[in-house]
Image (cartoon, rainbow, N blue to C red):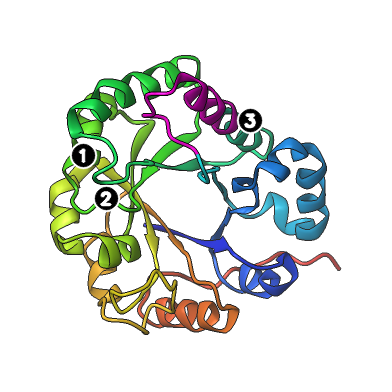
Amino acid sequence: MKVYISQLTETENIIDLLEKYQVGLEIVLFSSPYCLDKQDEFIESYKEELGDLYNKIEIGIHGPYADLCVGSRDNLIVQVSNYRMQQAYDVAKKMNANYVVYHNGYYPKTYSYEEWMQRTPNYWKNFLKDKKNDKIKIHIENVHEDESFIINELMHEIYDEKTSVCLDVGHVNVFSKTSVRGWMDSLGKYMKHMHIHNNSGDNDSHLSINKGNLDIIEILNKVKDRDITISLEIIDVDELRESLDILYKNDFIKLRELVKNN
């Protein structure tokens, strides 16, 4: 299991954490269409902000999601969605990232299962056609799904070594009638990435791993020995720091040994 931290604050606020722990960085900035349109400018800014760390840490990208719907019955909306998702993939290539996370985009009771499954697998198959031979993984994330069935069925159609599920445990706790354990058991091998944060089941609050009603340590123990990546999606920097300390004390992460120039 490899651990990343999802960047939900300014880079200067997490530099010390990246220096202290052997963790990667999941960059959220490029979920913004504005930043995607000015991607080269923002990539250069990242390189400057991270300095020597840029070539020492592993990087992932969180792709765009607002207003996007790859299963839409409106082809123009699908075209815009594809344009934005391709931009994020381009960013990942330019930054030598390991993966991109995309939201599944399914809202229960807005599309029938049958209609969604007529469109979505074909969208992803077409999106992936020219990407099979590079190393960048694609993880498709649950958000508002109330059960694992539809994303599981999508994986039946498109899963391979490149394309898998990002299980967001906080989203499950708020939006799903099935437990996190139920999702994990259902997804099985399809789950290759996880977004880890906590809440009380009433709001997607992105709290520290020890603040909420999810037993995050128990969840992580179930995947500790798997070939899987996780990203801590915790908004408050102090709570992120606290969570990393907990992971370190429980042997999920190690201290980073930086080589300093004399």
In this view, the mark in front (3 or 1): 1
Residue drawn at (78%, 39%), measured in percent from left and top?
38
Is 102 a magenta residue?
Answer: no
For mark 1, what is the residue?
A: 150
Q: Which residues are magenta?
A: 68-85
Location of residue 198 by image quarter? bottom left
Q: For this view, does 67 lie left or right of residue 43?
A: left
Is 77 a magenta residue?
Answer: yes
Q: Reading the chain from its start, which is encountered first: label 3 or label 1? A: 3
For mark 3, what is the residue?
A: 90
Q: Reading the chain from its start, which is encountered first: label 2 or label 1? A: 2
Count neighbours of disc 1 (C-alpha within 10 A) and say few if under 14, some if 14 to 19, many if 20 or more: some
Residue drawn at (56%, 71%), measured in percent from left and top?
21
For mark 2, what is the residue?
A: 145
Front position in the image: 38 or 75: 75
Give yes or no for contact between labels 2 and 1 (Cβ–Cβ under 8 Å). yes
* Marks 2/1: CA–CA distance: 8 Å
Front position in the image: 181 or 123: 123
Which quadrant does the N terminus fall into?
bottom left
SS category of the residue bearing label 3 = helix
Front position in the image: 15 or 237: 237
